[in-house]
Image (cartoon, coloured by chain):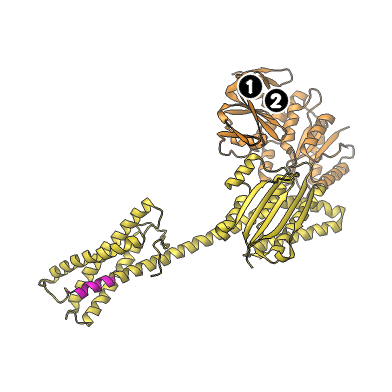
Chain colours: A orange, B yellow
Amino acid sequence: MTTALIAEDEPLLAAALRADLAALWPDLVLLPTAGDGRTALDTALARQPELCFLDIRMPALSGLEVAAALAEDWPEGPGFPLLVFVTAYDQYAVQAFEAQAVDYLVKPVPRDRLAACVQRLQARLQHRAPQADALAQAMAQLRTLLGTQAPPAQPRLEVIQAQVGNLVHLVPVDQVIYFEAADKYVRVVTAEREHLIRLSLRELLPQLDPAVFWQVHRGTVVRARAVASARREDTGKVTLTLAGRSETLVASRLYAHLFKGM
Amino acid sequence: MPLADNAPMPSLRATGSLRPMGVRFLINQGACSLLAVVLWQFGVSASLWENWVFSLLIGNCCWLLIDGGLRLAAVWVRRHHDGPATWPGWAWATPIVLIGTLIGYQVGHGLSRLVLGLPGQHALVQPRVLLLSLVAALAICYIFYARERMHAQHLQALAAEQQASRMQLKLLQSQLEPHMLFNTLANLRVLIGLDATAAQGMLDHLIHFLRSTLASTRLEAHPLAAEFDHLRDYLALMGVRMGPRLQSRFELPDTLAAVPVPPLLLQPLVENAIRHGLEPKVEGGRIEVAARRDGERLCLRVRDTGLGPSDTAAAAATAGTGFGLDQVRQRLHTLYGSAASLTLRRAEDGEGGTEVTVTLPLRA
């Protein structure tokens, strides 16, 4: 039995996709629809469907962010799901999907287009690549997609203004060792102390120099020069030790390729 | 002359352009010849030829000194302050015209005597001729000045027209955002199958929305009530898409319904509230659009209970670089100058979210 998850924040569109899929693929088991990215991620990790239909623009996490998080946290064992991205109008995204041979649907989704997608998915489920290859392939695609979908670089941030009550701490960016996402905030960690800023990592990233700060996990951006060593674990993750901080950081599978020996 | 020192005289053409110089040369020859005929008629000298030689030589000497002096002064002024390329202002022009005429008269007069072989004392060497030269120089200067002023005004008008059409196009593009349009159509397509009556209602909102969006590019202003109707259509469309995640509330006092406002001024603000505030928030929220009168000013407020501005978004908004806020600010500035304002801040009551306030002068 094949199970599928639909992540779509617009209730009508979700209901329609559900109905159309049910008609075209009667054996398909549909998990409850996820109305936002966070729910989609949790549901997918908990129920491990074979297929995920991910809307690109969703609350909490975008479809691409859900895919990246799945690639990072997908457990060993079950096959990585086949991903189909759904988008309303975004010619750049569509070009990126085309270039990566990733399945995508453009809303409104005509019935015959969905039927073709269903056939392709069924064929691919029958000849599934071994787990390791499927995951590696999905990750290579996602890396490129995330690269092409990155927002354009903004003026570089020089100083971070971290407010505590009425007091604002000025933290020079070149003293920061790493940034870590914490709910709606970002933790700014220097050698001596840490601060919280009200900003998402997504908003912060375009303001950092990508040659200086590397994203190593969806929630972590580290100063490359502050990384002392990287140890590859069996799970595909990489543990990083830092110069100037005692704690370790984890680089996910999606970014582990940054820490290969020369 | 009702002209201030800083009267707009920006010839957008480069200072060294030769064509306007040639035109001025020709105008000058014509004026000098005319003056020669006048002098001859008044019998200053019996010979038209003599009058003409004097007039041309003096006139051209004055012209070269004055025109050259003005250009040099303009270049100097421009290097040290912002100013037009060809006109240094009357504070410079007055002494240049006076001194240029005096010297030009002397030099031109000497040259004429050389050319005609006349003795030191001649009927043409008289104070009234010097005075006449001065009057002529001033008149010609003024003709040049007025010509350039007209030319500059023409160029300015052209530039303003171009900017206006560019703004219109940008406005239209921003208001018919493809993502919104295609998502709405996708919803409509589903609704047709599920609930034909609801689909018709949605289509009506879409038609109104498109009609008022297209009309807005042709209108200078429309009543505040029309602005609110447009926003109602937009939020009704978004309401179908977002379902119970979106609630909206409008507050428009009857006394303000007819007040004219720039069309679709608030649309980008409401769009921002949805796009950056409510759409990314899992549980959604409420959007409020309210108008109130504050003395002689109109206060418009768009508030959402969404995510609220992040620290950088608020900073960007203050700096005038955020979202579509920039566009609204620009429009306000073009239309009202410093009499209108836009502020964005985190809503301070318990519900959170973003609050944008636009204040503009109330015009009947």
Circle 1 residues within 10 Å: few <14, some 14–19, many ≥20: some
Q: Position of residue A195 (x, y in %)?
A: 64, 30
Q: Could you tell whether A21 is left or right of B216 in the image? A: right
Callout 2: residue from which chain? Answer: A
Q: Circle 2 sits on which residue?
A: A252
Q: In the rendered structure, find residue A259 and report the number of the disc placed on it.
A: 1
Query: Which quadrant does the C terminus of chain B fall into?
Result: bottom right
Residue located farthest toward the left when viewing the structure as drawn: B119
Q: Position of residue B348 (x, y in %)?
A: 71, 45
Magenta region: B126-136
Say which amino acid is labelled 1. Phe
Is residue B134 part of the magenta span, yes or no?
yes
Callout 1: residue from which chain? Answer: A
Residue sitting nearer the eye, A26 or A154: A154
Is residue B292 part of the magenta span, yes or no?
no
Residue sitting nearer the eye, B40 or B303: B303
Give yes or no for contact between labels 2 and 1 (Cβ–Cβ under 8 Å).
no
Circle 2 residues within 10 Å: few <14, some 14–19, many ≥20: many
Q: Is B253 located above or below residue B308 in the figure?
A: below
- Residue name at image x 22 percent, y 78 percent: B39
Q: Is residue B321 visible?
A: no
SS assignment at label 1: helix
Say which amino acid is labelled 2. Ser
Overall secondary structure of the magenta section: helix
Q: Position of residue B9 (x, y in %)?
A: 41, 62
Query: Which quadrant does the N terminus of chain B fall into?
Result: bottom left
Q: Could you tell whether A96 is left or right of B145 in the image? A: right
Q: Is B184 located above or below residue A139 in the figure?
A: below
Q: Is B266 located above or below residue B283 in the figure?
A: below
Q: In the rendered structure, find residue B247 and report the number of the disc placed on it.
A: none
SS assignment at label 2: loop
